[in-house]
Image (tube, helix red, strand yellow):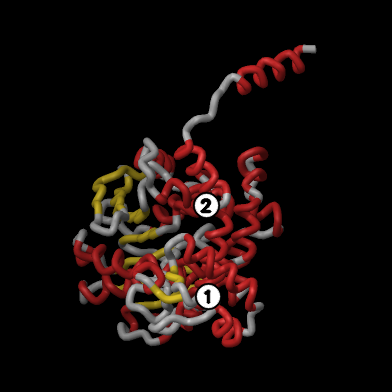
Amino acid sequence: MALPILLSTNIAFADNIEVTGLKQRAEILNITYAHISARALHLAAYYKIFDLIDEKGTYAQELAEKLKFHDTNLEGLLMVLANHGILEKSSDGKYSLNEKSKMLVSTAIGSLQPAVAKEYDNRRWSSIGRLDIAVVDGRNPFEALYNETFYDYLDNNKAAADLFNKGMTNFSGKENKEIPSLYDFGKFKTICDVGGSDGSLISEILTKYQTVNGSVLDLKSAIRESSILKNNKFGNRLSGIEGDFFKSIPSSDAIILKRVIHNWSNEDCIKILKNCVSAINDTNLGRIFIIEKVMPTIPDGSLLIDTSLGGIALGGSHERTISEFNKLAQSAGLELEKNLDTKTGISVLVFKIKN
């Protein structure tokens, strides 16, 4: 009998609340239906629709003919994008680019098209749609739905891997150019970029520090498709290694983990970090660099807080505060030596091995 009493009490309390905040009501409803505009944007970026819009404007019918899409439904998608200020629509029905949509043209310098297009992957979308698996049961939605990890999926699916790798590289350009000047990497003879994808960061380091030899350890899909590794301008100073950082990491003087730790559970992160420690040649001089965005402890409107929930859906992990990074590192026998901030907002955490 207790349950009905509790329910009736809650209902009575709710009935006494008068909703008068029209602005707050609108904000809640905008968030409620934000998945529709987000999906429209993912699809438009994936099919490079913004590339096909003429400077003078283009009708939806013209775009539908070029793409062989359903004209009425494409019009609906374009209207959503225009409704959110991503496209402009004139009184005669033509759609044109504005400052936002110009960033989504695939050939534009610094284009966001790859970063947005990677979100179109249906397995990513379905996993985020089943957040209840993570929040209610504590399980990994991607693994629960597909019986494999997200990274196994990428390693066995070239199209998905290409989409993901291009999207992640999209974030890295400015970061990778800034990082080599933040620390004297020239003190190391060998550096391994673990999970280094296309090798763009280690390439920037080798360019600045001529005496350093570098390697990239990653999945076969990333190593084999890397244009930097295929067109290796560093000769024997740079190598790509197909491997699994849960099993072993090449011996090195320094190890870089950029945007790796945030993909894994605490237990997995400790395994990775312990393997890094085991791979360091000289425990006194060796360093391990964790390069990640640092989660704020108090909500501040940061996009990182939202994307952290996406990480929970895909890999069972989340973005971490500096305190959480320290706890992981200490469990692996490391201690924080420096926290180097960048102009791009990513942090370079330098760890040394405890004696």
273 displayed left or right of 13:
left
Sort mark 1 into few (<14), some (14-19) or many (20+) by Cα contacts within 10 Å. some
Structural crowding at the residue carrying mark 2, measured as other residues with C-alpha within 10 Å and reported as few (<14), some (14–19) or many (≥20)? some
| Residue ID for mark 1 | 162
* Amino acid at the residue labelled 2: Gly
Res 45 seen here? yes
The residue sitting at the front extreme is 91
- x and y percentages locating residue 310 in the rendered image: 53, 52
Q: How far apart, in angstroms, are the residues tagged by discs 1 and 2?
A: 19 Å
Residue holding disc 2: 311
Query: Which amino acid type is shown beneath numbered disc 1?
Result: Asp
Res 334 quadrant in image: top left
Residue at horizontal 58%, vertical 82%? 61
Q: Nearer the viewer, residue 149 or 189?
A: 149
Indicate which disc, 1 or 2, sits on the residue closer to the N terminus.
1
Locate residue 42, reporting x and y percent: 53, 66
Determine whether, in the image, residue 128 is placed left or right of residue 354: right
Q: Residue furthest right?
A: 1
State which quarter of the image contains the C terminus: top left
Q: Which mark is residue 152?
A: none
